Amino acid sequence: MPDSPLINRLVGALRCLPGVGPKSAQRMALHVLERDREGGRRLGETLVEAVQRIANCERCRDLSEHPLCSRCADRSRDPGQLCVVETPGDVLAIDRGAGYRGYFFVLLGRLSPLDGIGPEHLGLDTLEARLRENEVRELILATGSTVEGQATAHYIAEMAEELDVRVTRIAQGVPLGGELEFVDTPTLAHAFSGRRELG
């Protein structure tokens, strides 16, 4: 490490990013200081502004600069469909590639009792209130296929069924164009057990 407390602080600060270890953080810090100070200033200013101005949408909990995000403000979307996801990144992926035109609800996590994350941390009271508005016809669960993601989906499904809301779960299994011999056993077993009729 360089013999500079400030550089060491910069390296330490960069390590808060996912997937950035000590060597990557050091390489980034030195790059900015050696070759792109203007880029570093822009990054710093934009990061400060984003942290100050971006919060969660009041309706769906996605990241937004405004009280209501652009998706929730879009009246051309189908109010009868509500897709529940774990992260804002999931919203981007589904919106970009699934042809989905309903609304979203972002949990900002998943149930994990070992980590102290319960229903109150996921905004499930807000989700329940939204389902009680009787506008949602189908609740689409798009949580991960981890044990915690499955438990979260089950918990939300029970809540929605008590309110007479139809619940569906996105299909999980063999990727499009995937070769069966390269798919891991649990994924293949899940895909096989979730098979449906053609036609």
Image: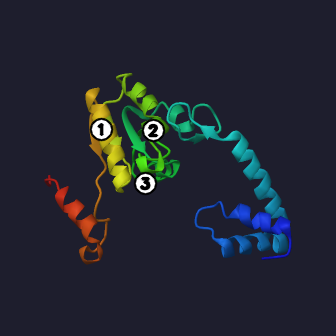
> In this figure, which residue is indicated by the disc labeled 2?
105
Question: Is 162 located above or below residue 140 in the figure?
Answer: above
Q: Position of residue 125 (x, y in %)?
A: 44, 29
Residue 193 disc label: none
Q: Which residue is mark 3?
A: 97
User: Which mark is first along the chain, 1 or 2?
Assistant: 2
Kind of element beneath mark 1: helix
The scheme the figure's colours follow is rainbow
Position of the N terminus, as image quadrant, is: bottom right
Q: Are marks 2 and 1 in contact (CB under 8 Å)?
A: no
Q: Position of residue 154 (x, y in %)?
A: 30, 43
Q: Does the image show residue 168?
A: yes
- On the image, which quarter does residue 103 sit in? top left
The residue under label 1 is which amino acid type? Ala
Cα distance in 3D space between marks 3 and 2: 17 Å
In this picture, is 7 found above or below 76? Answer: below
Q: What separation in Å lies between label 1 and label 3 (alpha carbons)?
A: 24 Å
Q: Quadrant of residue 183?
A: bottom left
Residue corresponding to mark 1: 157
Q: Choose between 119 and 47: the one closer to the eye.
A: 119
User: What amino acid type should be assigned to the residue bearing mark 2?
Assistant: Phe
- The residue positioned 57% from the left and 32% from the top of the image is 68
